[in-house]
Image (spheres, helix red, strand yellow):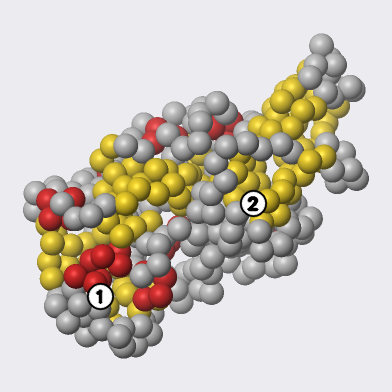
Amino acid sequence: MEQALATIIKPLPAHLFTMHGPSAEMRWEAMAGQGYHTPVDRFFVRNHTHTPLIDAATWRLRLHGPGLRYPTELDYDQIRAMPSRTIDAAVECAGNGRRFYKTQQHDAAPGTQWRLGGIGVGRWRGVPLRHLLQEAGLRPDAVDLMPTGLDAPFEDYGHVRRPLPVDKAMDDVLLAYEMNGGPLPPDHGFPLRMVVPGWVGIASIKWLGDIEVATRRLTSPWNTVFYPDVTTQPVKSAFELAWNARLTAGRSYVLHGRSWSGQGRIVRVEVSFDGGRTWHRAEHHGRHLVSAWLPWHVEWAPRRPGAYELMARATDETGVTQQLTRPHQPFGYHFDAVVRHPINVVHG
């Protein structure tokens, strides 16, 4: 299986992406008018090394370990011939929003300094992981799975891999081979990837090649050295606006945005135009999915020129509402405070 040396294969125009080394962050203004799903051409990319080019004809998925009665190896055609399911689900980097620990809370955290563009919602088609596990004879004493990717080893830590509890694997995890109606692009996991709804993106292993099923708890560098103690994603909100966007005083605008939570449906979104002194209920229509996001909109007519900070806060069905600050997190994960989005209102 030949591997390309290009970090990311698809085009990365500056009006769609902000680059962070081997990773590409979506610019939120690129989602304006794009419908519910994030188009492939602007879906963020988080790579540890570089995107591999894998030949589906020689690719195999190996399922093995003491937690299975019938270890097996499957090829691409066998996977695609199995009963399929289609879901709309977000994939989001655990460090999405990390920049704001520094810029809003003066408490910088190491790692990629994402704003809020380390997320995308795709329409994924594939095989429910529980189907493969049942076919391979999942044992009742199975505890953890260890999915492993086929991208190049990362430093001295080996291939990207992260344990997944059997309970989650048997719930809603998908082994996806299609994205937004077409085959998975190389940058997004071709020929097969995990999609773990509601969980941090590192759980959704790309370029899947191996799944070990164990009867004990498993560990890897990706739940000990990196991403310790993070699973379900918190509540967040973003405006579909450029950072430091320019609006004209005296005009009426319909501002759009999206809110999401790995814990449940978004039930309320509020927007402030005055630094949080007053809040206005945003309107929303259409899809209202647990595993994805809720699009919303609000009207605003700025009267006076000047610098403003737009703020959006969401509440999910568990009752969790975004707060104005987030407690320190040493790795910069799970920034879920209200983000202050700067804009400039100018004379008409």
Query: From the image, which quarter does the C terminus lie in?
Result: top right
Q: Residue furthest top?
A: 348
Residue 341 image-quadrant placement: top right
Locate residue 95 relative to residue 347 in the image: left or right: left
Residue at (26% x, 52% y) in the render: 84
Measured as percent of width and height from the top left, residue 227 is found at 49, 68
* Element carrying mark 2: strand
Tell me which residue sits at (40%, 62%) in the image: 172
Q: Amino acid at mark 2?
A: Ile
- Between 105 and 58, the one nearer to me in the picture: 58
Q: Residue furthest left?
A: 58
Q: Residue at x 51, y 73 (%)?
A: 228
Which residue: 38% across, 80% down?
219
Q: Determine the image quadrant of residue 303.
A: top right
CA gap, disc 1 to disc 2?
35 Å
Give how far across and how far down residue 245 sits, in percent: 69, 27
Disc 2: which residue: 266
For the residues bearing labels 1 and 2, Cβ distance under 8 angstroms: no
Instruction: Choose mark 1 or mark 2, whichever is in front.
Output: 2
Residue 232: quadrant of the picture:
bottom right
Residue 120, disc: none
Residue 260 position, x and y percent, is 60, 50
| Callout 1 secondary element | strand
* Residue under pointer 1: 212
